[in-house]
C-alpha cells in the first residue's frame, strides 16, 4: 500500500466536477497541473467538499476586503 500526496492551492483550481455512480461518488479537480480524481463512498462528504472548494475558489477570484466596506 502507498500514499501519494500533492499540495494544491485554490488559485490553481480551474473547475470541479461531481459525479455519482451507484454507491460511489467521484470528485474531479481540474487544475493547471492536470486532473485529480477522488473517489469515495460517502456522497454527502463529497458534496460538502465540492461546496467548500467552490466557495474558496470564488473567494480567491473575488476577494472582499477593506476597499468594499465603505461602498453604499
Image (tube, rainbow, N blue to C red):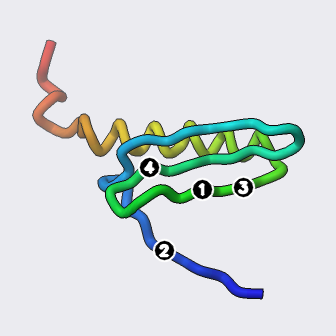
Q: Mark 1 and mark 4 in contact? Answer it, CB < 8 Å.
A: no
- Ranked by sequence position, the earlier of labels 4 and 3 is 4
Secondary structure beneath disc 4? strand
Secondary structure beneath disc 2? loop
Please tell me how crowded label 1 is: few (under 14), some (14-19), or many (20+) other residues with Cα within 10 Å.
few
Secondary structure beneath disc 1? strand
Where does the N terminus fall, quadrant-wise?
Answer: bottom right
> Can you give x and y, in whole percent of width and height, for residue 55 in the image?
45, 38
Q: Is residue 68 left or right of residue 42?
A: left
- Ranked by sequence position, the earlier of labels 1 and 4 is 4
Circle 1 sits on which residue? 37
Circle 2 sits on which residue? 6
- Residue for point 48% across, 74% down: 6
- Ranked by sequence position, the earlier of labels 2 and 4 is 2
- Residue for point 55% across, 39% down: 17
Q: Mark 2 and mark 4 in contact? Answer it, CB < 8 Å.
A: no
Between 10 and 36, the residue placed more toward the observer is 36
Any mark on residue 30, and which? 4
Please tell me how crowded label 2 is: few (under 14), some (14-19), or many (20+) other residues with Cα within 10 Å.
few
Any mark on residue 68, and which? none
- Ranked by sequence position, the earlier of labels 2 and 3 is 2
Circle 3 sits on which residue? 39
- Residue for point 75% across, 36% down: 20
Secondary structure beneath disc 3? strand
Q: Mark 2 and mark 3 in contact? Answer it, CB < 8 Å.
A: no
Which quadrant of the view contains residue 21?
top right
- Foreground tag (2 vs 4): 4
Amino acid at each position: 500500500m502507498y500514499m501519494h500526496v500533492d499540495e494544491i492551492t485554490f488559485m490553481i483550481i480551474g473547475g470541479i466536477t461531481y459525479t455519482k455512480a451507484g454507491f460511489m461518488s467521484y470528485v474531479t479537480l481540474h487544475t493547471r497541473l492536470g486532473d485529480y480524481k477522488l473517489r469515495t463512498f460517502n456522497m454527502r462528504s463529497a458534496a460538502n467538499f465540492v461546496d467548500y472548494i467552490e466557495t474558496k475558489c470564488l473567494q480567491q477570484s473575488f476577494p472582499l476586503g477593506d476597499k468594499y466596506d465603505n461602498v453604499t
